[in-house]
């Protein structure tokens, strides 16, 4: 049996390692931290959650729920760790970051088929007949490894900006000015809600518009793109300078827009985005506030909360000043400020098969955000599939793609079949799933019922695939 080498200890890498090892394969898991860190990571832990601590909705028959249900049925090790370290978050699955990483590390350390190497991998041996490689080095892949990937693929990586939300010390929140509630009373009332009046909101928006932003470093600049959507020169990603003719303005991922960018699109845009008050009845007034900021629990001890959707690229001093304009946070102590950092991913429609193999080098698989999926759960799911595909290849078998009807299959189908000129990373949504037949759509007008049927079909197809 061939050995499996997995590069990257984020989310996809450990899941792939545990999947392949549980299927009897010998696995080497390489992680460069702490020998070399990245611009966004704070620890050398496996499965560090860099941005938020949420793995999205657990509402039945939602797209994120479906993806997680499929993963649970496939024995996702990281999802088990998430379930075991969850913190109250209404209808979402959120975790205690430190405990989650600790549990994943234990699973890896205890598995006899996994060898961990703390090393920076800078070369990929595509011609080694005895090794299957999974590249899951993440959106901040080191420059030498990125250059090696460019050598193999003959194309550059695309880039966008991703974000980190601020975290506040729970003891410094003025609880007399806030209230606990879940939107539309779905799930338990685990979110702290900071209500704005109209004047407070307008003052906040004005301050946000005038705030000073951090200038992105040269390594974060996005080079000019060619007609395929890929950078036009092999050295552009490392050499483009702020303000140069070769650099492009920031290309943010729409699901993680900085608040100042959202506010720039219109005075009320934040009220229909992360500050949406709908369904958050204030018990003091019996009405929805004009706008609202939600805080989500960070740890099991409930000693810190993150500001939901409040990623930004403001200077830290500006963040301290402006975020303290939020009702209830006037005297807040921030344990971490918001950040925006560059992420990279390959042009999957041109490069990958539906089994996550490089078309030109089938012994190398790409998993996680580097493959073009976006989000924690999606990255773990990608690792789950890659680990299973690699195990099949190690046994000398041809891996079977996940069924198109399923959430996993639909997500993989998207990144490998998307229109090449406008390819952008994707979260799991019902838009990616196979729609119901036209006759059935006309018959069933209720969207929730349509989604229920799609989920039912997906889980049935997934179970058949698992057995096969």
Image (tube, rainbow, N blue to C red):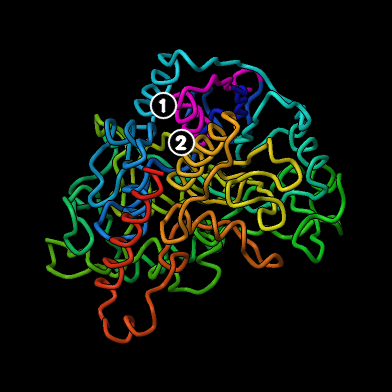
Mark 2 residue element: loop
Q: Mark 1 points at which residue?
A: 101
- Residue at screen point 23% across, 41% down: 88
In the picture provided, is 88 more to the left or to the right than 439? left
Which corner quadrant holds the N terminus? top right
172 vs 65, nearest the viewer: 65
| Residue 128 x, y percent position in the rendering | 75, 26
Q: Residue shown at 42%/65% (left/top)? A: 203
Instruction: Locate residue 110, reporting x and y percent.
Output: 40, 14
Mark number displayed over residue 440: none
- For label 2, count other residues whose C-alpha is less than 10 Å away and answer few (under 14), some (14-19) or many (20+): many
Write down the region rendered in magenta: 11-35
Magenta stretch encompasses residue 33: yes
Query: Is 66 above or below relative to 444?
Result: above
Report the Cα–Cα distance between label 1 and label 2: 8 Å
Q: What element carries label 1?
A: helix
Residue 273 in picture, x, y percent from top left: 41, 65
The residue depicted at 64 percent of the width and 62 percent of the height is 423
Q: Measuring 78% from the left and 49% from the top, which residue is drawn there?
A: 156
Which residue occupies the foreground of this view, 452 or 273? 452
The residue singled out by tag 2 in the image is 49
* Residue 249 against residue 335 in the figure, above or below: below
Residue 219 placement (x, y as % from top left): 74, 42
Which corner quadrant of the image does residue 101 belong to? top left
Q: Mark 1 and mark 2 in contact? Answer it, CB < 8 Å.
A: yes
Is 263 within the magenta?
Answer: no
Q: Nearer the viewer, residue 166 or 348?
A: 348
């Amino acid at each position: 049996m061939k050995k499996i080498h997995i590069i990257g200890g984020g989310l996809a890498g450990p899941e792939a390692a545990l999947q392949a090892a549980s299927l009897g394969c010998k696995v080497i898991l390489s992680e460069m931290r702490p020998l070399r860190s990245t611009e966004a990571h704070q620890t050398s832990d496996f499965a560090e959650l860099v941005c938020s601590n949420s793995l999205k909705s657990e509402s039945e028959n939602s797209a994120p729920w479906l993806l997680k249900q499929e993963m649970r049925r496939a024995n996702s090790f990281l999802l088990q760790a998430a379930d075991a370290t969850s913190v109250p978050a209404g209808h979402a699955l959120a975790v205690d970051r430190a405990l989650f990483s600790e549990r994943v590390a234990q699973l890896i350390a205890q598995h006899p088929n996994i060898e961990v190497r703390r090393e920076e991998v800078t070369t990929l041996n595509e011609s080694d007949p005895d090794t299957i490689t999974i590249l899951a080095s993440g959106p901040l892949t080191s420059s030498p490894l990125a250059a090696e990937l460019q050598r193999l693929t003959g194309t550059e990586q695309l880039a966008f900006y991703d974000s980190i939300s601020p975290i506040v010390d729970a003891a410094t929140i003025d609880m007399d000015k806030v209230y606990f509630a879940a939107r539309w009373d779905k799930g338990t009332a685990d979110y702290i809600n900071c209500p704005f009046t109209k004047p407070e909101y307008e003052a906040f928006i004005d301050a946000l518009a005038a705030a000073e932003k951090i200038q992105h470093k040269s390594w974060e600049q996005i080079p000019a793109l060619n007609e395929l959507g890929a950078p036009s020169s092999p050295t552009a990603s490392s050499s483009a300078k702020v303000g140069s003719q070769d650099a492009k303005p920031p290309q943010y991922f729409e699901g993680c827009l900085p608040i100042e960018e959202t506010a720039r699109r219109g005075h009320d845009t934040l009220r229909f985005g992360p500050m949406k008050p709908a369904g958050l009845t204030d018990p003091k007034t019996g009405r929805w506030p004009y706008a609202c900021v939600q805080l989500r629990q960070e740890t099991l001890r409930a000693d810190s909360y993150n500001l939901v959707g409040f990623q930004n690229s403001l200077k830290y001093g500006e963040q301290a000043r402006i975020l303290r304009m939020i009702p209830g946070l006037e005297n807040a102590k921030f344990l971490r400020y918001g950040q925006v950092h560059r992420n990279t991913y390959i042009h999957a429609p041109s490069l990958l098969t539906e089994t996550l193999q490089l078309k030109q080098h089938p012994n190398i698989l790409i998993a996680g955000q580097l493959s073009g999926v976006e989000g924690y759960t999606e990255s773990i799911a990608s690792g789950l599939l890659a680990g299973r595909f690699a195990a099949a290849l190690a046994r000398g078998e041809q891996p079977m793609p996940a069924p198109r009807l399923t959430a996993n299959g639909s997500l993989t189908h998207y990144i490998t079949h998307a229109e090449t000129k406008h390819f952008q990373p994707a979260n799991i949504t019902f838009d990616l799933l196979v729609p119901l037949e036209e006759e059935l759509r006309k018959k069933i007008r209720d969207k929730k019922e349509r989604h229920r049927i799609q989920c039912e079909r997906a889980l049935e197809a997934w179970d058949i695939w698992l057995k096969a």
